[in-house]
């Protein structure tokens, strides 16, 4: 399966935080010859046999996506919801959604501009109603309080290299880890014991990484996520699309490990960028580094435009180079 088709498969799957089983099962299917374990919304994949003489590298990519949870139904059959993750509220009016396991279609309600006034309430989660085209009695037969709701746009190729889709945060990272694993398995000369973690709940509590890092007890962690890409002249802390992955440098990361990745990239002619995060990284690395007696960690981030909307944008080139850099680190 080529990278675009893999990305399409991953981004169109469910998996709002706290309900990741479906995406775990899809990714597990990519590793038919490896030991896989699904636990509490986390998927753990062991690449090859464990060698006690080698150090263990954990490669993490969170797989939960932002969304909502149904909190109640109104007398008119509209849905009220709570926020899961930090959805960009500005893009919600008239947005299309899927509700529950049956993926019932819905539209977020909005007033036409002709009927709005200067005193209109801001678009807050408490004001959101979702129209599912049913009265309350009909809706109650199909929808339950607690059902997840996800924003959805089909994965679309804007050009040969640029892709737009929902949930690229962080299905793009998951695609990079899967691609890296394929390279590692095909080489069969692993410098480390390699364990993949496709983790749950990063968008809300980082619970999946906390639990799994404790259980796996790695020596080194590579945390693969997305980061902000420049769109309209944002500051220099943002990455550049098609500039390669961003190697994190932060007080909460291992400086020598970050330098090692930069050196590998230079030696192998892999384009990379540097991401300076003075204190915390805002990724699973923040909790993995303090697991048990401490874990040396580095972040590898894929530049992404329009984060936490239904139409995020990434470069396939950046995903491919992220995968290559990971594989080069893990191979002898």
Image: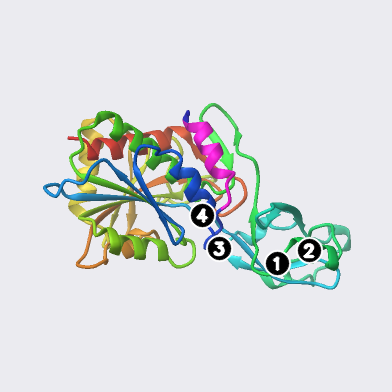
Q: Front-most of 5 and 261? A: 5
Q: Residue at x 73, y 67 (%)?
A: 128
Find out whether residue 326 is within the magenta segment.
no
Q: Earlier in the sequence, mark 4 or mark 2?
A: 4
Dominant secondary structure, magenta: helix
The residue labelled by disc 3 is 86
The image quadrant that residue 143 belongs to is bottom right
Q: What's the distance in space between the residues labelled 4 and 1, CA to CA?
A: 19 Å
Q: What's the distance in space between the residues labelled 3 and 2, CA to CA?
A: 30 Å
> Mark 3 against mark 2, which lies toward the viewer?
2
The residue labelled by disc 4 is 21
The residue labelled by disc 2 is 141
> Whole-percent x and y of residue 127?
73, 71
| Res 74 label | none
The residue labelled by disc 1 is 144
Q: Earlier in the sequence, mark 3 or mark 2?
A: 3
- What is the span of residues highlighted in magenta in the rendered image? 3-14
Q: Residue at x 55, y 44 (%)?
A: 11
The image quadrant that residue 109 belongs to is bottom right
Q: Secondary structure at mark 1?
A: loop
CB atoms of marks 4 and 1 within 8 Å: no
Q: What's the distance in space between the residues labelled 4 and 3, CA to CA?
A: 21 Å
Q: What's the distance in space between the residues labelled 4 and 2, CA to CA?
A: 24 Å
Q: How many marks?
A: 4
Q: Secondary structure at mark 4?
A: helix
Q: Earlier in the sequence, mark 4 or mark 1?
A: 4
Q: Front-most of 150 and 38? A: 38
Residue 198 visible to the viewer: no
> Whole-percent x and y of residue 34?
34, 41
Q: Secondary structure at mark 2?
A: helix
Q: Indicate the colouring scheme.
A: rainbow
């Amino acid at each position: 399966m080529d990278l675009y088709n893999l990305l399409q498969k991953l981004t169109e799957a469910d998996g709002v935080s706290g309900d990741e089983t479906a995406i775990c099962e899809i990714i597990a299917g990519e590793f038919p010859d490896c030991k896989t374990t699904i636990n509490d919304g986390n998927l753990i994949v062991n690449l090859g046999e464990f060698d006690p003489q080698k150090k263990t590298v954990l490669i993490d990519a969170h797989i939960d996506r932002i969304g909502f949870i149904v909190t109640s139904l109104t007398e008119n059959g509209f849905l009220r919801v709570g926020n899961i993750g930090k959805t960009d509220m500005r893009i919600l009016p008239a947005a299309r959604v899927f509700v529950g396991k049956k993926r019932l279609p819905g539209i977020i309600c909005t007033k036409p501009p002709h009927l709005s006034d200067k005193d209109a309430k801001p678009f807050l989660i408490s004001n959101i109603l979702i129209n599912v085209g049913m009265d309350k009695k009909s809706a109650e037969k199909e929808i339950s309080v607690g059902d997840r709701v996800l924003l959805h746009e089909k994965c679309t190729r804007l050009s040969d290299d640029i892709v737009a889709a929902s949930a690229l945060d962080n299905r793009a990272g998951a695609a990079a880890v899967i691609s890296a694993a394929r390279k590692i398995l095909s080489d069969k000369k692993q410098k480390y014991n390699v364990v993949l973690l496709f983790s749950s709940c990063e968008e809300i509590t980082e619970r999946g990484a906390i639990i799994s890092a404790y259980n796996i007890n790695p020596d080194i962690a590579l945390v693969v996520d997305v980061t902000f890409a420049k769109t309209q002249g944002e500051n220099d802390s943002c990455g550049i699309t098609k500039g390669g992955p961003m190697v994190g440098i932060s007080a909460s990361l291992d400086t020598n490990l970050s330098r090692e990745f930069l050196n590998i990239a230079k030696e192998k002619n892999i384009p990379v960028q540097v991401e300076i995060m003075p204190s915390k990284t805002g990724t699973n690395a923040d909790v993995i580094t303090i697991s048990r007696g401490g874990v040396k960690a580095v972040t590898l981030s894929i530049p992404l435009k329009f984060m936490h909307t239904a139409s995020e944008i990434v470069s396939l080139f950046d995903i491919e180079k992220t995968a290559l850099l990971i594989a080069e680190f893990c191979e002898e």
